Amino acid sequence: MKSGAFGTGSWTDTSPHNGCRIATMVAIWELAANAAASNSSLTAVSAQELAVPVWELLDFVSHHAAIARAPSIRNKEEIHAHTAH
C-alpha cells in the first residue's frame, strides 16, 4: 500500500513487513482447512471461494506440499510456524 501527500512527489510504503505475504498465507491455509473439512480438493474450494489468485495458490502449494494434507489450522501461531522459513 502506498500513501503520501498530494503534490509533494514523495510516497512512503506503509505496508507491514511481509504483510501481503502473510495475508496470502493465511488465506491459503484457510482454503486448505476448508478443503479438508469438506473433503474437497484445494482446486475446487479455491474456485468456489475465489479468496486467492490461482497463481499464488499454485506457487504456494509447489513450495509447501504439506498444505494439501493439512487437516486444520487452529491459530495464528500455527500458521506462522508453517510459513516461517
Image: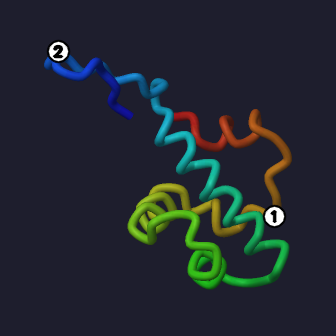
The label on residue 36 is none
Q: What is the crowding at mark 2: few (fewer than 14 residues within 10 Å), some, or many (at least 20)?
A: few
Residue occupied by mark 1: 71
Q: What is the crowding at mark 1: few (fewer than 14 residues within 10 Å), some, or many (at least 20)?
A: few
Q: Could you tell me the amino acid type at mark 2?
A: Thr
The quadrant of the rendering that contains the N terminus is top left
* Location of residue 56 in the rendering, given as x and y in whole percent from the top left corner: 43, 61
For discs 2 and 1, the disc positioned in front in the rendered view: 2
* Location of residue 30 in the rendering, given as x and y in whole percent from the top left corner: 71, 59
* Location of residue 6 in the rendering, given as x and y in whole percent from the top left corner: 24, 22
35 w.r.t. 44: above or below: above
* Location of residue 24 in the rendering, given as x and y in whole percent from the top left corner: 53, 50
28 w.r.t. 13: above or below: below
Q: How many marks?
A: 2
Q: Is residue 51 left or right of residue 11?
A: right
Q: Quadrant of residue 37?
A: bottom right
Give the colour scheme shown.
rainbow
Q: Earlier in the sequence, mark 2 or mark 1?
A: 2
